[in-house]
């Protein structure tokens, strides 16, 4: 059997490296799995308990709104159980109204909260719906947060 040419040998080396890369990545994932699992468990223990979560979230959203100078209106909740993780996902819809700077301060307050708030969408309400001061904007806000089930 003849030996491969230098070009063939180089192509074989490249193929070998391409096949080894996913294996090395999988081995790294397997090695990191215990730490990742511990990090997930630590994260989940930081979540509010479902038993007091609603009142805590409602209170905190009100405090952030007051501190940032926006009005918070019509907050509604839609819980979804995540039984495999022992969690509840809480989707929230609300409307905030204030000037642009204050709306940004509100969003910044959510970001800096000790609780986890995931902003799903921000929708600027039509100008005709704005009944406040001329420079005020009204934003429909969709958020998610998570509670741990006791």
Image (cartoon, helix red, strand yellow):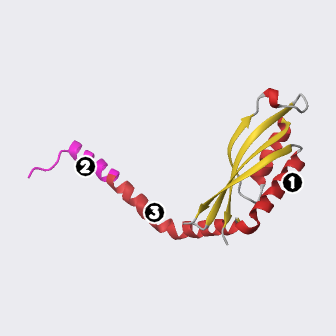
Residue annotated with mark 3: 28
Q: Is residue 68 left or right of residue 54?
A: right
Q: Secondary structure at mark 3?
A: helix
Mark 1 vs 2, N-terminal side: 2
In terms of depth relative to the viewer, which is nearer, 125 or 7?
125
Mark 1 or mark 2, whichever is nearer to me? 1
Q: What is the spatial separation of the Cα atoms under label 3 and label 1, in whole angstroms?
A: 44 Å
Residue lying at the far left of the rendered structure: 1
Residue 42 in which image quadrant: bottom right
Q: Position of residue 88 (x, y in %)?
A: 64, 62
Q: Residue at x 29, y 49 (%)?
A: 15
Residue 71 in which image quadrant: top right
Residues drawn in magenta: 1-18
Mark 2 vs 3, N-terminal side: 2
Residue annotated with mark 2: 12
Residue lying at the far bottom of the rendered structure: 150
Q: Position of residue 9 (x, y in %)?
A: 23, 48
Q: Residue at x 85, y 52 (%)?
A: 62
Mark 2 or mark 3, whichever is nearer to me? 3
Q: Position of residue 5 (x, y in %)?
A: 18, 45
Q: Is residue 128 left or right of residue 17?
A: right
Mark 3 vs 1, N-terminal side: 3
In terms of depth relative to the viewer, which is nearer, 101 or 75?
75
Residue annotated with mark 1: 63
Q: What is the spatial separation of the Cα atoms under label 1 and label 2, in whole angstroms?
A: 64 Å
**Type of secondary structure dominating the magenta stretch:** helix
Q: Secondary structure at mark 1?
A: helix
Mark 3 or mark 1, whichever is nearer to me? 1
Q: Residue at x 57, y 66 (%)?
A: 85
Query: CB under 8 Å between callouts 1 and 2?
Result: no
């Amino acid at each position: 059997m003849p030996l491969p040419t230098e070009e063939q040998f180089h192509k074989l080396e490249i193929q070998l490296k391409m096949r080894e890369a996913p294996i090395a990545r999988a081995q790294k994932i397997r090695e990191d799995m215990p730490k990742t699992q511990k990090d997930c468990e630590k994260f989940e223990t930081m979540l509010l308990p479902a038993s007091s979560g609603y009142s805590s979230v409602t209170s905190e959203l009100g405090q952030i709104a007051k501190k940032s100078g926006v009005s918070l209106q019509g907050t509604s909740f839609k819980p979804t159980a995540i039984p495999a993780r022992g969690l509840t996902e809480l989707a929230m819809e609300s409307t905030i109204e204030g000037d642009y700077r204050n709306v940004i301060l509100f969003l910044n307050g959510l970001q800096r909260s000790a609780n986890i708030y995931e902003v799903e969408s921000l929708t600027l309400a039509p100008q005709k719906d704005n009944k406040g001061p001329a420079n005020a904007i009204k934003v429909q806000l969709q958020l998610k947060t998570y509670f741990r089930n006791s």
